[in-house]
Image: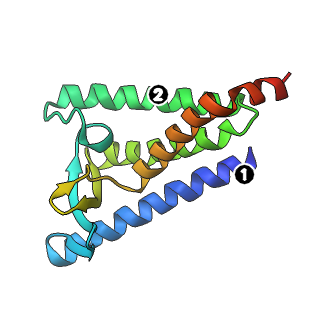
Amino acid sequence: MIFCSLVIVAIVLLDRLTKLYVLSLVEIHNHVDIFVTSFLNIYLVWNKGIAFGLLNFEQKEVYNFITGIIAMISLAVLFMIIKTKDIRVYFLSFIFAGAIGNLFDRLYYTAVPDFIDLHVNNFHWFIFNVADIFISFGVICLILVELIFDKYLVNENK
C-alpha cells in the first residue's frame, strides 16, 4: 500500500506541475501554442467535459452532476485499490491518481486544462493532459490483464 500511495502522489504531482507550467506560460505570453515536433504541439484548451473533451457542457448543473459522478467513481476506484491484492492495484492506482488530478482541476478551475496536442498532418487527436495519459494507460492495462492474465491471477489468489 505504501508503494501505491507513493505512485499516486508522484502522478498527481507530475500532473499538477505540468499543468502549472503550461498555465504559467499563458500568464507570461497570454496564450500557449508551442510547436514541439512535427507531431506534437503544446496548446491549451479548457475542458469542461470528461476524458478527451467528451460530453462538454456549458450548463452548470450538468457540469456539477458530471463532477459528482467522477468523484463517486474515484471513491469506488480507491475502494478497489484497498481491496485488490494483485498487479491490478497498480493500474487502479494510475486511474485513481489521474482522476484525482483532473477532479482537483474541475473543482478549482471549473475546467480541466488540456494541452498535449498529438497530430499527424491535419489529423489531430483529442487534446489531453498527463492525468489523462495515466487514466488511459491504467484502463488499457486492466483490460489486458482481464483478457490475457485473468486465469493466472485467479489461480494465484486461491
In the structure shown, which secondary structural element does the residue marked by tag 1 occupy?
Answer: helix
Callout 2 amino acid? Ile
Q: Which residue is mark 1?
A: 3
Residue at the extreme right? 158
Callout 1 amino acid? Phe
Q: Is residue 99 left or right of residue 77?
A: left
Dividing the image into 4 quarters, which one contains the C terminus?
top right
Tag of residue 73: 2
Residue appearing at x 51%, y 40% in the figure: 140
In the structure shown, which secondary structural element does the residue marked by tag 2 occupy?
Answer: helix
Residue appearing at x 24%, y 61% in the figure: 120
Residue appearing at x 28%, y 72% in the figure: 24
Q: Position of residue 110 (x, y in %)?
A: 25, 44
Dividing the image into 4 quarters, which one contains the N terminus?
top right
Q: Is residue 5 left or right of residue 115?
A: right
Q: Position of residue 74 (x, y in %)?
A: 49, 33
Q: From mark 2 to mark 1, how far is it between C-alphas?
A: 22 Å
